[in-house]
Image: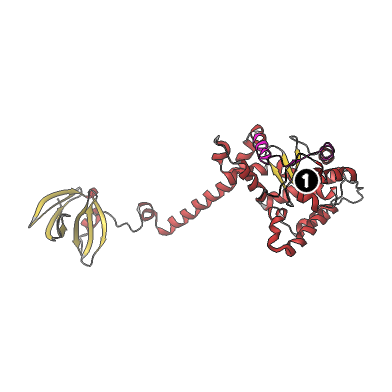
Amino acid sequence: MSGRHPVWHYDGRSAVRHDATITYGPQGFEMAGEGVAFQSHRWADLAYRGEKREGALYGLKSDAGWQIGLPDPLPDDLRGFLPKPQRYGGFIDKIGLVPASIALVVISAGVIFGAIKAPEIVAPLVPMSWERAMGDAMVGDLGGRICETPESRKAIDAMVARLGSKGEPVEVNIANIDMVNAVALPGGKILIFRGLLQEAKNADELAGVLGHEIGHIRNRDVMVSLLRQMGLTVILGGANPDMAGALSSLASASFSREAESEADDYSIKLMQKASVSPDATAGFFDRLSEGEEELGQAAEAFSYLSSHPMSEKREKAFRESKLPGARHTPVITAEQWRAIVDACANDPDVKEGSDLMF
């Protein structure tokens, strides 16, 4: 042992304070005093407990009530043996409060970024067979509200063929739901709600919306959105998700602005290649956007406004996409358009959709 220093001591079993003396060295200390049983402890057994007016407090890690107090001034060699004070915790005290705060911000930002970007990485890896199964389940949850007549089926297929998107087959159906909306589902499925058909004035207006939803499918935006909303565990863990709830989420969800812009670009390219005028789609967006202010809270029924952000820039993009000298023809005939619009009215087996809320 290399030195001695006075201490006060509480044994943790009574409130009596004892004066004692420690004899210390590099490995630890021995303590003795009046009313204090001889004790020997290693420095590693001690933990810093705080400060009192007289000096610093230390306790045994194995005994919460045991304490010794070392009055100031402390010899330099004794100070070097004692555990260092910890105000925040081991890691923070080791590197400092400011560096630890910066590290926490960086880690938090990394976690948030990973949660946002991970679905974009995972989505292309999801087998298309899984997507189709989910899409089939979601459409099945509509419970017979899919409208179809032989004429409407031929007309829809003609519109899809005219737009000519390359890739996995796209299946477009009409849902007897009185909302101005269209939604892309997993597995290349698209639902057009009856309310959207009633709002559109012609097939070319619908063509731009349809091309937009096809763009979401081709860019795998649908699976990215599902992965973000439902979680990787539900999608990839073999659980049986509530498909009706997933359909509801997709119907009201907003893709990122980047994804929306890319889907618009995809739609514009399809229409340019098919020689379909973009003016009708631009007018459709402009008309819905103007109606949003008049509808106020009732605009929630126009969910195409909430799930697809409207703006002058978006309308302008369609209106200015017309190629110089291009000749345009309607995407389908007027008779085919009427068959699509009247599909729900002419289908005797379709259920009413007014009770299906999203």
Residue 306 pos. (x, y %): 69, 55
Residue 36 visible in this rendered orientation of the protein: yes
Give the percent coordinates (x, y) of residue 138.
66, 40
Q: Image point 65% across, 47% down: which residue?
A: 250
Q: Which residue is mark 1?
A: 210
Query: Which residue lies most toward the top here?
Result: 129
Extreme residue in the bottom direction: 53
Q: Which residues are magenta?
A: 133-156
Question: Nearest the camera: 345 or 18?
Answer: 345
At 78% across and 37% down in the image, what residue appears? 166
Does the magenta portion include 290?
no
Q: Is residue 249 left or right of 337 when viewed as pictured? A: left
What is the quadrant of residue 309 in the picture?
bottom right
Asked if residue 218 shows in the view, the reply is no
Q: Position of residue 12 (x, y in %)?
A: 17, 55
Left or right, residue 328 beside residue 110:
right
Q: Does the magenta run of residues contain 147?
A: yes
Residue at 79% over, 44% down: 344
